[in-house]
Amino acid sequence: MNNDWKNTSTVYLQQHSRYYQWVLYPMIVLILGIILFLVLGSSEQVVHGTAKISSKNIVPIQVPIEASIQSNNLKENLEIKKGDALISFDVENLTKQKEQLDTEIETLKNKNDTLSVFIKSLEEEKNLFTQEDAYGYSNQINAFFKSKEKTIQANKQVENNYQSNVQNALSNVNQLNVQIAKKQSKLQELIQIRTAWINQQNIHNYSTEYMSQYELWQI
């Protein structure tokens, strides 16, 4: 029985020895390695010294305006921070050009508004300008309406003259018709008197002038 217990103890010790050798010891080593990494790896090491940093890529600065450089504060190894003025440009000419363009734009806008009032005045046939404008459109409107009024008056005068001439012509025609009727009546009477004279007949109901002449013709 003692021999069995010894054999069993020997097997047990051998199995635990293998367990420590292949499982427990590697785990302990791994845990120690992680702890050392966390302790030593997170520590900062400060190195004091002088260094020169040069850029691998040099990018040229392009300014999308035509202006000369007034001051250049760029220097090699210059320490800068946000908001530092590095380069300043002379924008006086650009400012003058902008002011000139603003003036031209304002002038064109005023002219466009004035033209709109001019067109509306023509459409409504009345001067909508409250005062004289810088482009003379108000005077043009007044001159146009005066000319139009003169043309209308002239057309009315021509129409009146035409109507008057028509009336005069109709009156003349009526007078001529009356005269023609009288002449035709007189001619008819003369024909009748002549016929009566040829036939040696007496006439009646004619004018005194014709009756006297007829009596003379009979003698």
Image (cartoon, helix red, strand yellow):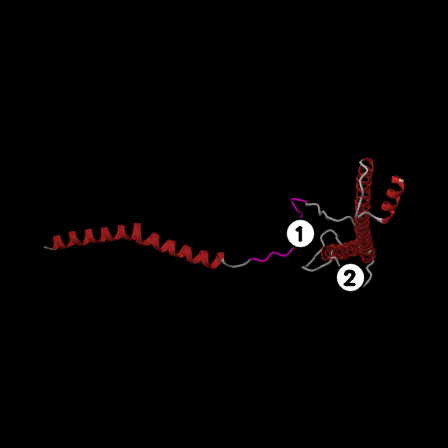
Residue 160 in the image: state x and y as whole percent: 80, 53
Label 2 and label 1: CA atoms lie apart by 77 Å
Foreground pick, 149 / 7? 149
Q: Is residue 3 left or right of residue 219?
A: left
Determine whether label 2 and label 1 are within 8 Å by CB.
Answer: no
Which class describes the residues within 10 Å of circle 2: few (<14), some (14-19), or many (20+)?
some
Q: Name the chief secondary structure element in magenta.
A: loop
Q: Indicate whether residue 50 is drawn in magenta.
A: yes
Which stretch is magenta? 45-58
- The amino acid type of the residue labelled 1 equals Ala
Residue 203 in the image: state x and y as whole percent: 80, 44
Question: Residue 211, labelled with which disc?
Answer: none
Judged from the image, the secondary structure of the residue bearing numbered disc 1 is loop
Q: Which residue is mark 1?
A: 51
Foreground pick, 58 / 27? 58
Judged from the image, the secondary structure of the residue bearing numbered disc 2 is loop
Give the answer, above or below, for where 102 lies relative to 218.
below
Residue 163 in the image: state x and y as whole percent: 79, 51
Question: Residue 129, labelled with which disc?
Answer: 2
